[in-house]
Amino acid sequence: MCELYVKADPILYESRSRSLRIRGVVTTLRLENQFWELLREIAEVDGMTTNQLISKLYDEVMEYRGEVVNFASFLRVSCTRFLSQAPQRSAEVLSLVAKV
């Protein structure tokens, strides 16, 4: 089982910083490449750019919680929640296709 993790391409867990504008303020986020790729995929599903998705998530968590203690961690958790719901989303899509 450990081979699955140990043999991962090191580029996936290499960190990369990106500058983006959130609420008119330029900020830098540092995430591992794997998370940047997942955010890109989530944004694509929602018809947005990665920066638009990140800004929207920031706005929504601020509205809901009133603060963001660690936004990078919030984004990582959001990515893992997206992945954990993938089977459910697939089942929903299949049921919609079956109705057509």
Image: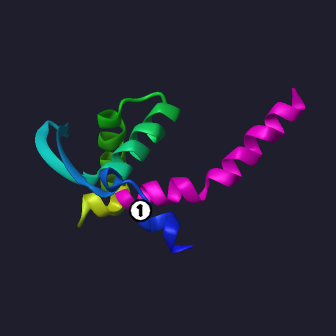
| Above or below: residue 32 compared with residue 23 | below
Chief SS of the magenta region: helix
Q: In front: 60, or 39?
A: 39
Looking at the rendering, the stretch of residues picked out in magenta corresponds to 76-100
| Above or below: residue 81 compared with residue 57 | below
Q: Percent from the top left, x then y, of residue 46?
A: 50, 33
Q: Is residue 17 left or right of residue 60?
A: left
Q: In front: 53, or 38?
A: 38
Q: Is 81 within the magenta?
A: yes
| Above or below: residue 22 compared with residue 35 | above
Q: Is residue 87 left or right of residue 26?
A: right
Q: Which residue is mark 1?
A: 77
- Quadrant location of the N terminus in the rendered image: bottom right
Q: Percent from the top left, x then y, of residue 75?
A: 35, 55
Q: Residue at x 11, y 40 (%)?
A: 25
Q: Is residue 1 left or right of residue 73?
A: right
Q: Residue at x 47, y 41 (%)?
A: 42
Q: Percent from the top left, x then y, of residue 7?
A: 44, 61
- Quadrant location of the C terminus in the rendered image: top right
Q: In front: 36, or 100?
A: 36
Q: Percent from the top left, x then y, of residue 39?
A: 40, 44
Q: Residue at x 51, y 59 (%)?
A: 81
